[in-house]
Image (cartoon, rainbow, N blue to C red):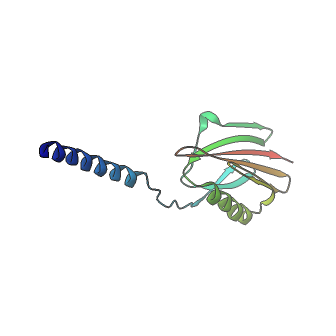
Amino acid sequence: MKKLLVGFLAIFSIFIAGCSEISTMTQKEPIVLTPKTVKKGEFTFVIPANFVLEENKSLVYEIKNEIRAYLVYTGKGSLDDLVTFFNEYLYKLGWNRESKLVGEEAILAYSRKDQLLVIRIRPKFQITQIEFLLTKK
């Protein structure tokens, strides 16, 4: 009986140690959103530097030096932090917020002169997708 109890305690302690390793690995580390300026034609905007352009999901249309684009970026960042990031850094580039809708996802619209920038922030399991629509008013 003692051997069975000792064996059970050994297996249980290994299980508990393994769970603590997993919980340590999944704890969120703070993500610093550093602005990176992007220029597409006459459009200049910012994205967090840790986000990468998904070229296979993006589309850029250019005719007579006019650009329209649908750009998809992926990276890590919380919805609230990204909304704050865009409000702060796009304003510094002269963009004015026209609209904001925040729930499980966020849709932000900004304008500058005759340009319109619509941003959709979509948090997923371990990654966040940001979609940009660059167009004219």
Residue reaching furthest to the top: 56
The picture places residue 10, in percent across and down from the top left corner, at 20, 47
Which one is in front, 77 or 90?
77
Q: Nearer the viewer, residue 48 or 69?
A: 48
Count of marks, rendered view: 0
- The answer to whether residue 88 is above or below residue 11 is below
Tell me: 82 left or right of 107: left
Q: Residue at x 54, y 43 (%)?
A: 125
Query: Quick check: 29 left or right of 24?
Result: right
Q: What's the residue at 60%, 37% (across, down)?
A: 55
Identified at 63% across, 54% down, the residue is 79
Image position, residue 88 (x, y; %): 69, 65
The residue depicted at 50 percent of the width and 61 percent of the height is 30
Give residue 78's position: percent from left, percent from top.
59, 55
Vertical placement of residue 55 versus 14, above or below: above
Residue sitting at the far front: 1
Residue 106 locus on image (x, y percent): 71, 50
Q: Which of the two residues, 122 or 110, is positioned nearer the viewer here? A: 122
Quarter occupied by the N terminus: top left
Q: Where on the picture, by quarter, is residue 113?
A: bottom right
Left or right of residue 119, residue 111 in this image = right
